[in-house]
Structures are given as C-alpha cells and as structure tokens.
Amino acid sequence: MGSSMELETHGIQIRFDTLQKKSMASKIPQLQSKVAQASQVAANRGGSYYKLLMEQNKHYIQDPPTIEKCQSLAKQLFYTRLASIPHRYDSFYKELECAKNMLKNRQNINIENAGLVALFGLECYAWFCGGEIVGRGFTVTGYYV
C-alpha cells in the first residue's frame, strides 16, 4: 500500500512536470522576441554608454593594466576590508547594547521604536529566507532531488 502511494505521488509529480514544461515551451517565442529586442537596444546604445561610462570614471582606471597592478589592488581591497572588521564589531556591539537597553526599558517603548524593531526583525527574516534560497540552489519550493 505504501509503495502504491509513492508511485501515485511520483505519477502526479511527473504529470505536473510535463505540464510545466509544456507551459514553458509555449512561452519560448515570446522570450526569444524579448531577448532580440534587448540585444538590439544593447547593440545600438551599448557602445555609447560604455564610452560615456569610461569617460566619467577615467580617474579610477589604472594605466597600464598589468597583472601586478591588479594583484596589488586586490591585496589592497582585501586588507582594507580586513582592517574594517574591528569597526564592524564595534558597530555590532553598539546596536546590541541599544537593543538590550530597549528590552530593559520596555515601558518606555513608543510606536516608532516598536515599528523599527518590527522592521529589523522582518529584515533579519528576509535575509534568512534569502540565504535558504541560495543554499537550496536558488529554488523557492525545495531541494533538487
């Protein structure tokens, strides 16, 4: 009895996947036309946008672009980010102290502070959900089996 349920469940999943593929296949021409439009716009405007972008940001460009210079810049970025860790910890502990003080003085919490706490909690939950989605391989519904 258990195996027939499994087979029946798998049969529904297979039929669902087939219907989903047929639905996706019907949208291919529409997708192809949108891709063609986007590539046409990129071909027409891409070169001028690139030139404008490079002109506006030419003071950031290292000339000549050697491998040694790129490695040096990568090391600078790495050690700059590494040096910022103590400041990040300080900021974190300040926020934590603020949260502890708010919990100690719950009777002084007004609507504005409660809204900020709710938004912060919602943001934490959103980052958690985003991490879960990334961890599952960018699927919203579940793991690939």
Image (tube, rainbow, N blue to C red):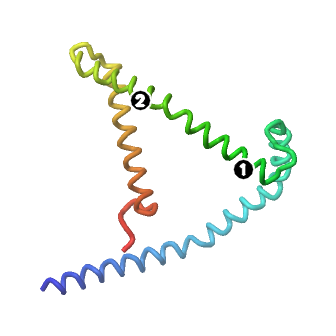
Q: Looking at numbered disc 2 in the image, what kind of residue is underneath it?
A: Phe
Q: Which residue does the numbered mark 2 point to in the structure image? A: 92
Q: Nearer the viewer, residue 139 or 128?
A: 128
Q: Position of residue 83 (x, y in %)?
A: 56, 34
| SS at badge 1 | helix
Q: Position of residue 115 (x, y in %)?
A: 34, 25
Q: Which residue does the numbered mark 1 point to in the structure image? A: 71
- Which corner quadrant holds the N terminus? bottom left
Query: How many numbered circles does the render carry?
Result: 2
In the image, farthest residue toward the top: 108
- Which corner quadrant holds the C terminus? bottom left
| Left or right placement of residue 44 versus residue 2 in this view | right
Q: Residue at x 68, y 47 (%)?
A: 74
Between the C-alphas of marks 2 and 1, the distance is: 31 Å
Occupied quadrant, residue 124 = top left
Viewer-nearest of discs 2 and 1 = 1
In the image, farthest residue toward the left: 1
Occupied quadrant, residue 137 = bottom left
Q: Are marks 2 and 1 in contact (CB under 8 Å)?
A: no
Give the crowd class for mark 2: few <14, some 14-19, many >=20 residues within 10 Å.
Answer: few
Q: Nearer the viewer, residue 70 or 97?
A: 70
The disc placed on residue 110 is none
| Left or right placement of residue 133 versus residue 81 in this view | left
Identify whether 36 is placed above or below 85: below
Mark 2 and mark 1 lie on one chain; the one further toward the N terminus is 1
Occupied quadrant, residue 37 = bottom right
Q: Looking at numbered disc 1 in the image, what kind of residue is underneath it?
A: Gln
